[in-house]
Amino acid sequence: MTLARAARRAREGFDDFVHSKLYIAFIAVVAYVLWYSENLLAAIAVLGVIGGLVLALVRDMVPMVPFVTMAPCVVHVDKMPGELWQYALAVLPVVAGLAIHIACYRRNKVASPKSNLLAMALLVVAMALGGLFSPAAQDGMTAFINVLYIGVAPLGVYFFVKLYGEAKCRLGDYAAAVMAIWGILTAAQAVTVIGGAYADGIDIASNGYVPRLGWGNSNVYPTVLMMCMAFNFYFMGKSWKLVVPYAFLTGIQFACVMYAHSRGALIFTIVVIAAGLIAVTVYNRKNPLYWAVLAVALAALALVLTFYWERLTLILGNTFEDKLQSSGRDYLYIEALDRFFENPMFGAGFGYVGYVTRLHTESGFYQLHSTLFQTLGSMGLVGVLAMAYVYVMRYYTVFARATRVKIFFFIAMIGFEGYSLINTSTFTGLPCMTVIYMLLALFELETVHNAGDIPVGATVKQLLAERREVWKKKRA
C-alpha cells in the first residue's frame, strides 16, 4: 500500500468517524473531562486542536455542529485565568484550520428565498440600529459587542454550515443525536455540581441554593435540558428498546431542573415532557411492545414518586414559596415599555445603561428578561418586524416539510419560546441561539438534499391540493 493510498484511507476513516454518533459522544466526553479539570486554558487548547483538524480535513461542516454546541460547556470558572495572548495561541489551530478550509474546499449555493438567512441578517441590522435617536444613556462599545455576540456570531455559524454542509449522513438523526448527547453532558455536569454541594452539607432543596455550571447558571442549563429532553422522546419513538433508558435519562434531567429552583424552567419542562410523551405515543400507538414498555416505565415512575414524594413536595414548595411573584421582572417590563415609548422606532439599543447595575455586571448588557420586552425596549418597531420575520421563516422551515425530527424540534421550541417570554434565552448567543441556528441550517440542508427522515405529512400545498380533489369528487 502506497503512502498516498494509506493517507486517503485514513482521511476517509476520519470522515466516517466525524459523521457518526460515536464522534458526538467523543466530543461530549472530552468536554466533560475538560470542564471537570477546571483548566480553561488547557481546555481551549485541546478544543483548538480538535476543531482545527476537523476544519482542515473535512469539507462537510455538519461535524462542526456538535463541536460548536458543546465547546462552551468546558467553561467551569467565572473569570478567565491567564493572559489574553495565551488564549490567542490556544485558538490558533482553529484559525489555521478555518483558513485552510476556506482556501481548499468548494462552497454551496446559500441564497434561497426559503432559507432563514435573510431573516437572520435583517435581525442583525435591526439590532445594529437599536438605540438610534434614543435619549437614553448608552454605552457604544457594549452595544457593538452584544450585536456581534447575539446577532453576528450565530448568523456566521449558520452561514458557514450552510456554505459547506453536505448530506453524508441522515441529518435529522444527526441533529437529534447532538441534542440528546448534549443533554446527557449537561445533566452529568449538573449532577456533579449538585452532588458536590450535597456532599458539602449544603441544603440543595432550599430555594436559596443556586447551582452554577460555569457556562450556564440556574436559568441557562435548565433551558438546555428542556430543549434536549424533547429529543429523548424522538429516540423513544425510534425503538421500544430505547423507551426505558431514555425515560430514565429524562427523569434525571428533570431532577436537575428541579434543583435549579427556576419556576419558569420547571413549568415549561413539564410542558415539553407532556408534549413529547403525547407525540411519541401517537407515533407508536399501534405498537403493542411500546405500550408494554411504557407501562413498565410509568410503574417505575410511580414507585419512585412513592418513595420520594416528601422530598419532591419539599423542593417544589421551596421553589414556589413566593407564590409566583415576578422577582422584579415587572419593573424591568415597565422600564422596557418606557424605553419603547420614548423611542418607538428603534428603542434604547443593546448598549442601554439601565437602572439595575447588577444586570450589567452579571450579564454584560441590560437584559430585560423577556423576548417580547427585550425586543420592544432594545429595538423598537424595527426590531418587532425583524423578529416577526425570523419567527415566520423559522417555523416555515419546520412545517413546510414536517419530518419527525422537526416535530420534536418544535416541541423543544415550545419550551424554549415559552420560557424565553420570561427569561433571557432568546438573547443568549451561546449556546442557545447558535445551536438553534445550526439546527435550522441542518434542516434546510436536509430539505435541499432530500435526505433525513421520511416526512410525517405532506406539505401545506399538497394538503390543500388533496382537499380540493376530495371536494371536487363530492361536488361531482
Image (cartoon, rainbow, N blue to C red):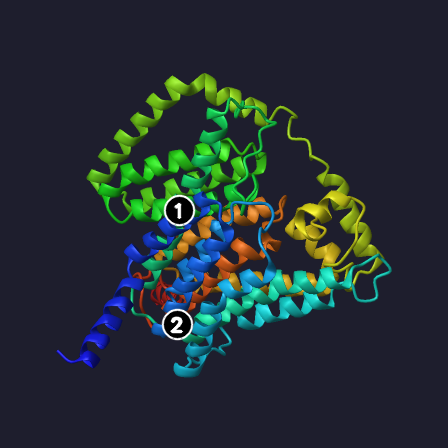
Mark 1 lies on residue: 33
Of the residues tagged 1 and 2, which is closer to the observer? Answer: 1
Residue shown at the point (42%, 47%) measured from the top left: 228
User: Mark 2 highlights which residue?
Assistant: 165
Question: Residue 274 appears at what percent x and percent y?
Answer: 43, 38
User: Residue 321 appears at what percent x and percent y?
Assistant: 62, 23
In the rendering, at what x and y percent does residue 80 appear?
A: 59, 51
Which of the two residues, 351 or 439, is positioned nearer the viewer here? 351
Q: Quadrant of the C terminus?
A: bottom left
Q: What kind of residue is marked 2?
A: Gly
Q: Is residue 419 above or below residue 326?
A: below
Give percent across and percent down for residue 221.
Answer: 51, 43
Q: Looking at the rendering, which quadrant does residue 166 occupy?
A: bottom left
Q: In the rendered view, would you say 337 is above or below 161? A: above
Residue flagged by tag 1: what amino acid is it?
A: Val
Q: SS of the residue at dot 2?
A: loop
The answer to which image quadrant residue 55 occupies is: bottom left
Question: Eyeballing the image, is 314 above or below 210?
Answer: above
Q: Residue at x 54, y 55 (%)?
A: 430
Work out whether residue 465 can be spotted: no
- Label 1 element class: helix
Say which mark, if any, is on residue 89: none
Q: Is residue 137 visible?
A: yes
